[in-house]
Image (spheres, grey):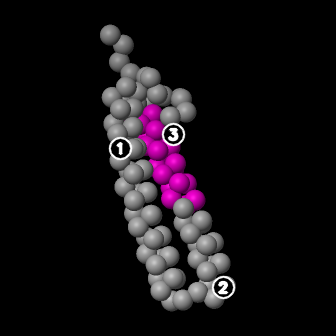
Amino acid sequence: MKKKNIYLVDVEFHEIWYGCTNYIGKKLLDIELKYTNEFNRLLNQEHTLDNIKNYKFSYIVTFEEMKQKLGNIYKTKFQHIVQNPKKYYKKDFY
């Protein structure tokens, strides 16, 4: 039985982990940019303080929900990839 170099396996998993966390960061950044632009638009128009507070609260809720959703998706995906590395290595699994 031919043993695989442990270093190569470690590099593969780090590469997979980096890809997963990078994708999560990009998704969260997209949400942040969308809400920041919308918030700036609200500030440049006449809105009540309650409207602005409600908007900020909705942003926080949306951001937290997306973090949880992406965290759960990629936790499951990463566990599956670690269990079946040959199936996913060097593929577009993000």
Asked if the stretch drawn in magenta spans residue 38, the answer is no
The image quadrant of residue 2 is top left
Q: Which image quadrant for residue 45?
A: bottom right
Query: Magenta-highlighted stretch: main secondary structure?
Result: helix
Q: Position of residue 26 (x, y in %)?
A: 55, 54
**3 and 1 marks in contact (CB < 8 Å):** no
- What's the CA distance linking mark 2 and mark 3? 39 Å
Q: Earlier in the sequence, mark 2 or mark 3?
A: 2
Choose mark 2 or mark 3, whichever is in front: 2
Whether tag 1 and tag 2 are in contact, CB under 8 A, the answer is no
In the picture, measured across the screen, residue 73 lies left or right of residue 56, that is: left
Q: Which mark is residue 45?
A: 2
Name the residue tied to disc 1: 75
SS type, badge 3: loop
The kind of residue on which mark 2 rests is: Gln
**Could you say which is closer to the camera, residue 94 or residue 9?**
94
Q: Badge 1: few (under 14), some or many (20 or more) residues near its Cα, within 10 Å?
A: some
Q: CA distance from mark 1 to mark 2?
A: 41 Å
Q: Quadrant of residue 61?
A: bottom left
The answer to whether residue 49 is above or below residue 11 is below
The 10 Å Cα crowd at callout 2, few under 14, some 14 to 19, many 20 or more, is few
What residue sits 61% from the left and 80% below the top?
A: 42
Q: Amino acid at mark 1?
A: Lys
Residue drawn at the location 59% of the way across and 66% of the way down: 33
Observer able to see residue 79: yes
Q: Which residues are magenta?
A: 10-30
Which residue is at 53% across, 29% downward?
90
State the mark number for residue 94: 3
Label placed on residue 46 = none
